[in-house]
Image (cartoon, helix red, strand yellow):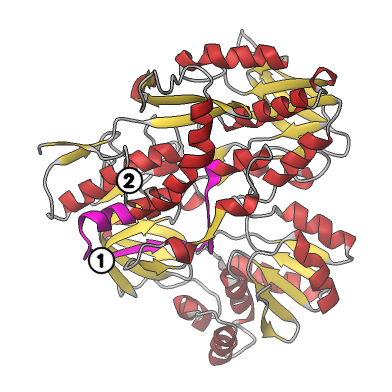
Amino acid sequence: MDIRQLMPELSVTPQITTADIAELKQAGYRAIICNRPDGEGSDQPLFAEIAFAAQAAGIEAHYLPAESGKVSDEQGVAFGQLFNRLPKPVLAYCRTGMRSTTMWALSSANSQPLPQLLDSAKNAGFDLKGVIRRLANHGRTPAELTDVAEAEHAVLIIGGGAAGIATAASLLARWPSLDIAIIDPADIHYYQPGWTLVGGGVFDAASTARTMASLIPRGVHWIKSAVAAFEPERNTVILDGCRVVKYQQLVVCPGLKLNWGAIEGLSETLGRNGVTSNYLYHLAPYTWQLVQQLKSGRAIFTQPTMPIKCAGAPQKAMYLSADHWKRTGVLDQIEIEFCNAGAVLFGVVDYVPALMEYVRSYGIKLDFSHTLVKVDGPRKMATFSRTNLDGSKEIVTRSFDMLHVVPPQVAPDFIRVSPLADAAGWIAVDPATLRHKQYENIHALGDVINSSNAKTAAAARKQAPVVAHNVLVALGKVKGSAQYDGYGSCPLTVERGKIVLAEFIYGGKVAPSFPSWLIDGTKPSRLAWLLKERILPPLYWKAMLKGREWLAKPELEDL
């Protein structure tokens, strides 16, 4: 852990895990304050997990979350009041420690000289220059943001995930001298499509993770911070700590927020009591553990209302689990239920017949229009809101021995409240060019856009070259308009060793990448499994993130 002391009885640290609690206990900490909201990152333990482990160790744990870059004066006061009544010493944490440090500084503005506050934060590795005016005003109303930027770049990319790094790499492949910066606070980059196979016992979790520093393309600036707000009329992005970065062209692709809190009781039991999710890095191995341990009983797999990233992922977890139970001879002893908030098994009808064969083979009970609303882990009960044919709703409760949950998903808060978002909270783009509908020097791609394509890494692989070309057009460096056709792909792992390779474009039209004699995507295929297991991971790391656009070069139209 990277623990940094702000004062004798208070230290801060980046995100902690349950495994760190024993070390904190040994170090003498008696209380923990969490300043990070649940759902900011896929590898982030929920506060309830931390609190459960802390309580077991005799450490108090308190939740005082703040959005990145939006720590309020009131939160500073609340932090001070909470700190004063807690047993000492106290450890506060958020994603990086910056929010916790800002709360502490605001809470101390009336009791410590400004130079002392700034010096203490600097010695701990935190720069508070973005809140100097607020501290000087003793935490009262801040002045307007300054027009003076700490940096300016030709192309500014928000998000260092698959879409962001691929776009930067594709830009450099076309224009090597281009001035590009990526904004992302994460230290680790994850190959999230691999988590299904982690949950199925095929991949090791560690193989899906690499350091962000190793993946940022050479020559691209990395601004390791979180975005707080956009000012598109001024070509400005406001970062955590109220820092300002300007741009000529902006590319927005930060990924989705997993809304765990939308399901009552889920946060308190996730990772325990047979409740798991392949949508979290640290829980995908727990899925495989549960699958191996279950010999009889009921296994429930849920799918929330769309949109979600990788719409086939809830089914993939179910099929791989059922296949293991079949291979180990216990399938007949296990009742499998698929509780789907939607009305169909899969959105592209051409692939449904093959999937239904597996549903019948595994004896899976399909429950459509079932939305998970509550989980009682200790009692092993899941509660659903069921929508009937006449539109009425009723509450149904099911017992479980294993529950695989896929949470509702939304755009990150700083996107949903921004001028870039539509009424539903998604970034409003032209579905072909991926340029923002209002701001001509802004493009967006990946999971946060409001186009109707599937939210998958395969979609981002096709979108990145389109955005790269169109950004260069906007900069006056190339000509022609690149068009995105809505391509998405979902390799549905129906059993270990076979995949139904769903590929489609806008309108649900099937769009195979390979001839049918090689891979017929509407049927289970061993070659498609080989593609998923052996070819796609290196294609991701060594091609997509390096600007090598295999099967992804966009068609160009004259302007």
Magenta region:
168-193
Quadrant of the image for the N terminus?
A: bottom right
Residue drawn at the location 78% of the way across and 29% of the way down:
382
Residue 217 or residue 3, whichever sits in front? 217
Residue 342 horizontal/vertical position (percent) = 57, 21
Q: Amino acid at mark 1?
A: Asp
Decide: is 292 above or below 76. above
- Residue 458 tag number: none
Decide if residue 215 is in sight here: yes
| Residue 301 position by quadrant | top right
Q: Amino acid at mark 2?
A: Ala
- The magenta stretch spans residue 177: yes
Q: Secondary structure at mark 1?
A: loop
Q: Residues within 10 Å of mark 2 (few under 14, many from 20)?
A: many
- Residue 179 tag number: 1
Residue 539 or residue 467, whichever sits in front? 539
The residue indicated by pointer 2 is 464
Q: Which is more N-terminal, label 1 or label 2? A: 1
Residue 427 horizontal/vertical position (percent) = 38, 42
Residue 385 horizontal/vertical position (percent) = 69, 23
Residue drawn at the location 88% of the way across and 64% of the way down:
57
Looking at the image, residue 140 sits to the left or right of residue 329; the answer is: left
Residue drawn at the location 48% of the way across and 20% of the way down:
347
Decide: is 445 above or below 348. below
Decide if residue 417 is in sight here: no
- The magenta stretch spans residue 92: no
Q: Secondary structure at mark 2?
A: helix
